[in-house]
Amino acid sequence: MGKYFAYARVSTPRQGEKGVSLPEQKEAIERYARAHGLEIIRWFEERESASQKGRPTFTEMLRLLRRGTVQGVIIHKIDRSARNLEDWADVGKLVDAGVEVHFATENLTCERSPGVSRPISRPSSQRTIAAISGKRSRKGSTGD
């Protein structure tokens, strides 16, 4: 079981109570972690817009992720992590360094494969594997 941080964010204190509130985000992240065997060792919560760089909690989490003490981070959904290019670039650098970035409510995990950082769409890769397996069982190979 890998160790992960969890990050939840709302744009305003009021949004923390309504809409996709912090408790709702935490619940979705916890469900995702349980389903994938990921251990959350620390939570980061923020009530601030992601349109500008410099959110204190997000910046602290990135600093700790750079240390490599955890395998990655689980975030509720993509727009909860970053909405500006500088933060996205920082997240991309972490992925390049081997940090996994999971999005709990979207079919996307960003992780490093040899020489390349790439997003992985879980359901489509699962469908591809199932299709290849089915074709092999019918024809004995994946060739036509």
Image (spheres, rainbow, N blue to C red):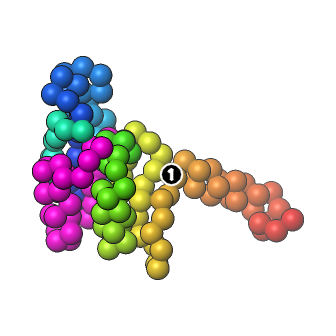
Q: Is residue 100 left or right of residue 13?
A: right
* Identity of the residue drawn at 77% across and 66% down: 142
Res. 32 image quadrant: top left
Q: Can residue 40 be seen at all in this image of the molecule?
A: no
Tell me: residue 37, above or below residue 96.
above
Q: Report helix, strand or loop for mark 1.
A: helix
Considering the image in quadrants, where does the N terminus appear? bottom left
In this view, the residue farthest toward the top is 18
Task: Write down the quadrant of residue 78 in the picture.
Answer: top left
Residue 137 image position (x, y, % from top left): 75, 59
Magenta segment: does it hold 56?
A: yes
User: Which region shows up in magenta?
Assistant: 50-76
Q: Is residue 34 left or right of residue 140?
A: left
Query: In the image as oriented, which residue stretches furthest toward the right?
Result: 144
**Nearer to the camera, 78 or 6:** 78
**How many numbered discs sit on the rendered protein?**
1
State the image coordinates of residue 107 (x, y, percent, origin top left): 48, 46
Residue occupying the point 50% across, 58% down: 120
**Residue under the image location 82 percent in, 68 percent down:** 143
Residue tagged by mark 1?
122
Q: Position of residue 37 (x, y in %)?
A: 31, 52
On the rendered structure, is 72 left or right of 143? Answer: left
Residue 54 image position (x, y, % from top left): 18, 53
Looking at the figure, which quarter contains the C terminus?
bottom right
- Residue lying at 42% horizontally and 55% vertically, measured from the top left: 109
Relative to the observer, which residue lies in front, 101 or 82? Answer: 82
Q: Residues within 10 Å of mark 1 (few under 14, many from 20)?
A: few
The kind of residue on which mark 1 rests is Arg
